[in-house]
Image (spheres, rainbow, N blue to C red):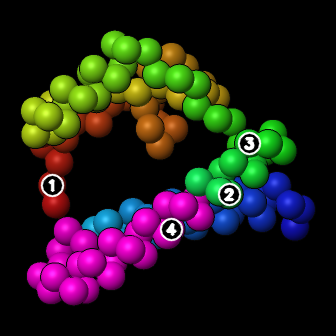
Amino acid sequence: MDDKVIANDCLESAKVACSEITKAIAECGNQQLRQTLTQLRNQAEQSQQQIAQIAQQQNWYPAAGPASPDEVNRVRSFFEGGGAGTVTATYPGAQTAGQTFGQTAGQFDYSTRRR
């Protein structure tokens, strides 16, 4: 394996760790364990940021461009409104305009999402 593959694998693993730890925090009833998990998530996020920075410097991972004020307001409104509705976000490397997170065409409709 070359360095680019290793870096991208580490980056993906760090993202998954952040996501899974966040899920555990949301389900945790023990405050002490919740604090420990929060610290672990913060460390995982720092690792992810460091790996992403290295990968970006080596041109192995495309950095997202700055969000426009309209995009920031749209996402803020979505989350402040309880997450009901649909969000579409574009990112560098998308095959088509309007492609959403996860590199799939279309939109995420959180109002009908099952847990």
Q: Are marks 1 and 4 in contact (CB under 8 Å)?
A: no
Q: Which mark is residue 114?
A: 1
The tag earlier along the polypeptide, 3 or 1, is 3
- Kind of residue indicated by mark 1: Arg
5 horizontally vs 69: left or right: right
| Quadrant in the picture for the C terminus | bottom left
- For the residues labelled 3 and 4, say whether their Cβ atoms are less than 8 Å apart: no
Q: Residue at x 69, y 36 (%)?
A: 62
| Element type at mark 4 | helix
Question: What is the three-letter code of the residue carrying label 2?
Answer: Ile
Residue 56: which disc?
Answer: 3
- What is the magenta segment's predominant secondary structure? helix
Mark 2 or 3, nearer chain start = 2
Foreground: disc 1 or disc 4: 4
Binning the other alpha carbons within 10 Å of mark 1 as few (below 14), some (14 to 19) or many (20 upward) gives few
Q: Is residue 35 magenta?
A: yes
Q: CA distance from mark 3 to mark 4?
A: 18 Å
User: Can you identify the residue that label 4 sits on?
Assistant: 44
Which of the marked residues, 2 or 4, is nearer the chain's N terminus? 4
Res. 51 mark: 2
